[in-house]
Image (cartoon, rainbow, N blue to C red):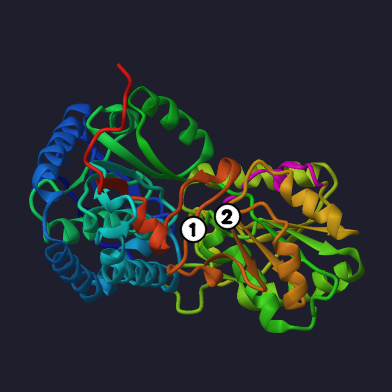
Amino acid sequence: MSKEPIIVSAIINGEKIQTDKKIARENPTHPEQIVGYAPNNTREETIQAIDAAHEAFKTWAWSNVDDRIERMNRAIQKIKDQMPEISELLAREHGKALYDAQGEIAISVMWMEFAVKNVKKITTPEERKHENGRTIIAQDPIGVVSAITPWNYPISLSTIKIAPALLTGNTMVLKPSPFAPLAVSLVTEIIADEFPAGVLNLVNGDAEVGIELTSNPKIAKIAFTGGTNTAKHIMKAASDTIKNMTLELGGNDAAIVLEDFDVNDERALRRMVISNFLSAGQICMIAKRVYVHRSIYDAFVEKYIEAANKWIRVGDPFHPEVTVGPVNNKNQVDYVKSLVEDAKNKGAKIIPLGTILNPELMDNGYFLQPTLVLGADVHDRVVVEEQFGPTVPILPYDSEEEVINLHNESIYGLTSSVWGEEEHAIKVARRIEAGTTMINTAAVQGLDVHFPFGGVKQSGVGREYGLDGIKSYTETHVINIPAMKELPYIPE
């Protein structure tokens, strides 16, 4: 599907800004095709956006919450109305299958609607009367938020920040990834058009833009989703001004299959396969390593391969039967290949999975056939590193103590899953070091925007989604009105 390239703008203080220097985004299915161009903004333009947000905050912080809700509801409706065009553009620039792109927008809207319905629970001051007087506990906006978002779920991982930030009275400067800047720019423009100038700003660019967004003293909070190593640089850049932060980072999420798991449960096996290969495995919360009790290991692998070969159909994202499209970019293709090759060189067995529906695309586009890795060592790269691509190792274990230790020795702790008899699985889950543990499901299938989401250890700081995700864009402000006005006795 070839179309004329789209050109998106930066948004600075309500103005749509074009630049001579642009970022080209190719189509991962047909890399010779340019889907569109985003502006390559400068440090100076980034400062202008921050200054605009800083000025707008002075009045927006004290705006009426009902007005904020009304504006956000109008934006939500416009996103719904334009979902076909936005999802098509997202599939073309990202490479994810069309149904997956549509699902991303649906999750985004679901979260935005939750934030709208629940923001008053957070922003309405609480007054307590007690024997010492009265205390008012308010949740005030923080200030200017810099939001830096990744390419894998560019719209949902931007709206997860935009909605609570603006609804609670903050202003924002958003920087998308250059690997998927187009559809998210359209969504951001839809939202920004409903708010006063300067409340929501949008810039694109390289390292100098990111550095300004993490070090500028007018930035009060950083909301970042991305790699752990990048987050370490962000924390250092922000340290001089002690900024508030929400960091949702990398994960090496494990699925633990207990000995009482029913290997003949086809629906459960399909859920497992989807949790490994949805969006070509490019999801922070996807199951990236699978541990199976040795007593059912052989039977599980056999049934897993059957389920994978039924569900995985690789090809053009717009093919109605495709479930797995190309990988987003060439660098990611090369990285995933290196992990698989490393495992193969160390004696692991590599099993291709699924059906290729468009074989003519495989050599030209950023395609990888999904693979299963068997016989890898627990410390091989494909096991301990976050693949972020369509490959998964399945490894046997002998005892619950062993597999819990294998899970918890990772530096990451974003999500995890335990599969088996429900109460038994819950008991094991309580010993897992992770921000979220899902029972008999994993990845997006087990995500609920009504509850907090985030990681432990090097998988992040803070929480998004749920009431906690709204509250994270506020600071607690305590106002004490004591009953006793006199000073306590102080000896001279």
Magenta-highlighted stretch: main secondary structure?
loop
Name the residue: 25% across, 58% down.
Answer: 125
Name the residue: 34% across, 62% down.
Answer: 90
For residue 324: magenta?
no
Label 2 with label 1: CB-CB less than 8 Å:
yes
Name the residue: 35% across, 68% down.
Answer: 105
Tag 2 secondary structure = loop
Mark 2, other Cα within 10 Å: few <14 / some 14–19 / many ≥20: many
Mark 1, other Cα within 10 Å: few <14 / some 14–19 / many ≥20: many
Quadrant in the rendering for residue 305: bottom right
Q: Which sits in the foreground, 236 or 181? A: 236
Q: In this view, does 259 lie above or below 407?
A: below
- Where does residue 458 sit, x and y in percent of width and height? 58, 40
Where does the magenta region start and end? 378-388
Tag 1 secondary structure = loop
Quadrant in the rendering for residue 54: top left
- Where does residue 373 sit, x and y in percent of width and height? 76, 56
- Where does residue 320 sit, x and y in percent of width and height? 45, 79
Say what amino acid the circle numbered 1 marks: Phe
Q: In this view, does 52 lie to the left or right of 463?
A: left
What residue did someone put label 1 on? 453
For residue 381: magenta?
yes
Q: In this view, does 403 lie to the left or right of 117?
A: right
What residue did someone put label 2 on? 435
Quadrant in the rendering for residue 198: top left
Q: Quadrant of the N terminus?
A: bottom left
Q: Quadrant of the C terminus?
A: top left
- Where does residue 442 sit, x and y in percent of width and height? 61, 67
Q: Is residue 197 above or below residue 80?
A: above
Q: Is residue 249 visible?
A: no
Count of numbered circles on the image: 2
Q: Which sits in the foreground, 148 or 343? A: 148
